[in-house]
Amino acid sequence: MRLFWIKGYEATSISDLTEVMGVGTTSLYAAFGSKDELYAEALRHYAANYEHLVWGRFREATTVREAVKAYLHDSAAAMTGSDCDLPHGCMATLGTVGSDGHTKLAGFMRSTRAVAFDVIVSRLARAVEEGELPPAFGIAKVGRFIQTVQSGMAIRARDGAERAELQGVAEIAMAGWDGFVASAEG
Amino acid sequence: MRLFWIKGYEATSISDLTEVMGVGTTSLYAAFGSKDELYAEALRHYAANYEHLVWGRFREATTVREAVKAYLHDSAAAMTGSDCDLPHGCMATLGTVGSDGHTKLAGFMRSTRAVAFDVIVSRLARAVEEGELPPAFGIAKVGRFIQTVQSGMAIRARDGAERAELQGVAEIAMAGWDGFVASAEG
DNA sequence: CCATTTATGTAGTGATCGATGCAGAATAGC
DNA sequence: GCTATTCTGCATCGATCACTACATAAATGG
């Protein structure tokens, strides 16, 4: 899975995988069926095992602001492999697949990314319902902003950015949050 | 070039290119030498021809704020092919190359991306020199933020985002700018 | 009009891609 | 211990990869 994470779908070959996994091609195909399905399974494994690094404090936060701030800061940490020795970047964001064929896999990846957006928007909607944010708050707009900043972090991490840099980005993004909240309230 | 733009380096084959360019492989290799060099040339062409779409108003702006705002908004427009019929996304940001071999090409792409950061930081530095921004202004930090937002826009554009969405992202990013400027001045 | 140079189209290079057929090894059931 | 079944290593499949040798076509120069 780490190979897919590091190199992406296209650049990772079956022989790369069998070598690292220590199994033959036969076993690999018996277990997964195809490279596409193997990648999808790796992506599921990735999501299941590292989800808490990014979403743990988001869920436990009491205020929306804390939740969003935790999401961005913890994304910064996870993408730079600060706590563990993880590859830089986000597999779901950066494992882009060329548009040829692979439409099923591309759709799966797209929906994986969409889930993150939905989680954020749901949290924002809850905050509006509970009166924590003003009714006129642009939920989708802010949700897209947060998603965009997090995606940008993934690219920066892949280019070698370290934790401190992305933390700084998260800080200024939160200034954007505060400014937008203020304008929505005023 | 558009093929490279749309599909990226790995997913674009030489036969794809000869087909759309209407030339044989011999002519192609006589002109460019290798796929790497062809891609590098395409990237140069891309940078030279579309640079003004993103940096034109940035350069002409009188204030830093206007410049940064123009950069983000025009990036949003260019990445969504609003004015012309351009592919979505940024070739320099998204044409990622697997880490194997291609180190020369990967370095060239990295430096292309770094140029954008340098241009932004230079503009910020000038603003500090001219007293438009406070001396304590975190130039690199804000520069990285702007770069990160723009990179994130590229991913969102590739995922199908339209202009309005990315314009909204740019707006909130500018709220972040204002908040950070205020905190640096205060 | 011919000779020489330049450009291009065709066919094919070895390498590697994702994916399989097959035969032997390991395991299970009794 | 013997059969039946599952699993795995090896060789290989056709397709395609980036790339090139070669022969022909176009263009140039006198």
Image (spheres, coloured by chain):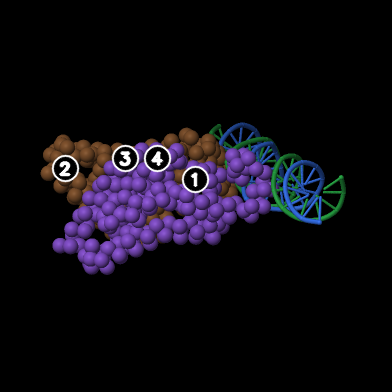
Chain colours: A brown, B purple, C green, D blue
Q: Residue B5 bears which disc, if any?
A: 1
Distance from disc 1 to disc 2, alpha carbons, whole Å, reads 38 Å
Describe the element under mark 4 as helix, strand or loop: loop
Amino acid type for the residue under numbered disc 4: Asp
The disc numbered 2 marks a residue on which chain? A
The disc numbered 4 marks a residue on which chain? B
The residue identified by callout 2 is A184
Amino acid type for the residue under numbered disc 1: Trp
Q: Nearer the viewer, mark 4 or mark 3?
A: 4
Describe the element under mark 3 as helix, strand or loop: helix
The residue identified by callout 3 is B165
Few, some or many residues within 10 Å of mark 4 (<14, 14–19, 20+): few
Q: Position of residue B101 (x, y in %)?
A: 56, 57
* Labels 1 and 2 in the same subunit: no
Q: Is residue A55 left or right of residue B99?
A: left
Describe the element under mark 2 as helix, strand or loop: helix
Q: Is residue B54 left or right of residue B97?
A: left
The residue identified by callout 4 is B83
